[in-house]
Amino acid sequence: MRLLIIEDEKNLAELLGSLLKKAGFAVDIANDGEKGSFMARTQAYDLIITDYVLPKLDGGSIIKEIRDDGRNVPIIMLSVRQSIIDKINILDIGADDYLSKPFSGEELLARIRALLRRPQTIKEEKLIFADLELEPKSFKVRRANKDIRLTNKEFSLLQHLLLNAGKIVSRESLLEHVWSGDVDPFSNTVETHILRLRRKIDNHQPKLIHSIIGRGYKLDTSI
Ligand code: CA
């Protein structure tokens, strides 16, 4: 899953970025409001965290632009001053939740999980395909009832394939959802990770991960 952080305090942005990466998310960072709003409206994010007081464009205007663009991605607003949060009606401007600074990493992760667990998303439920199971909450993967250990990236990659099981998932879509935007699209990162994932998942029949030449990858039992 891919998250965007819009935060002008670079130290805080980097701290949040590494916290969220450790938790298994792909993370992009924007250091001003204009750039953040542009990224939010041109890329596919699963959740956005934005500061309120930002150079060029404030958090409220960013959220308005994102919602006006028809995007219902969950948004968490951050602010140093409780008074700002008090003055604005968070729901009116279209944020889903807010945190006042300072906050703990644990609290932010809990809020993120709560938003990603909403009924309109299936992201927190157990994903099952053939004899393969993936549990986002406990970070568990099993095939034929045997536990399989995956790295964070392999886990996200498999999760994205499972959410789209039976459909072809393009390389671009994997780069977008599993990796941060800073991965060189011409590198063989995707291929390398697919290869490793296959070694762990597909070492017995039937093979589940299939390459569709020129188009991408597909989870299927019948190819
Ligand atoms: Ca700020």
Image (cartoon, grey):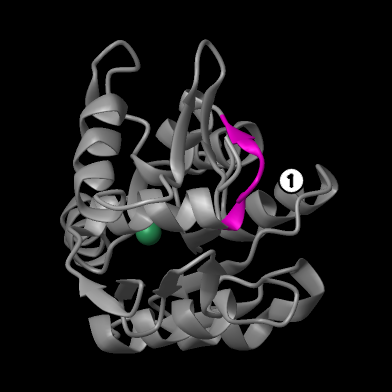
Residue 30 is at least partly visible in this image: no
Measuring 23% from the left and 59% from the top, which residue is drawn there? 152
Does mark 1 have its CB less than 8 Å from ligand 1? Answer: no
Front-most of residues 177 and 30: 177
Does residue 197 show up magenta in the picture?
no
Answer with the quarter of the image where residue 139 lies.
Answer: bottom left
Who's the residue at 48% across and 87% down the image?
Answer: 82
Q: Nearer the viewer, residue 205 or 161?
A: 205
Q: Nearer the viewer, residue 47 or 119?
A: 119
Tell whether position 165 is magenta. yes
Q: What is the crowding at mark 1: few (fewer than 14 residues within 10 Å), some, or many (at least 20)?
A: some
Residue 71, percent across and down? 76, 50
Q: Which residues are magenta?
A: 163-169
Left or right of 209? Residue 149 is: left
Quadrant assignment for ligand 1? bottom left
Residue 174 horizontal/vertical position (percent): 45, 36
Instruction: Tell me if residue 10 comes above or below residue 97 in the rendering.
Output: above
Would residue 62 be visible to someone looking at this image? yes
Q: Quarter of the image holding residue 196?
A: top left
Quarter of the image that includes the N terminus: bottom left
Tell me where residue 123 appears, x and y as whole percent.
56, 70
Residue shown at 27% from the left, 87% from the top = 106
Left or right? Give the position of 14 relative to 114.
left
104 left or right, relative to 98: left
Relative vertical location of residue 71 with respect to residue 85 in this rendering, above or below? above
Residue at the (68%, 52%) spot, across then down = 61
Q: Nearer the viewer, residue 99 or 46?
A: 46
Residue that mark 1 sits on: 65
Instruction: Name the amino acid type tagged 1.
Output: Glu
Mark 1 residue element:
helix
Counting labels gives: 1
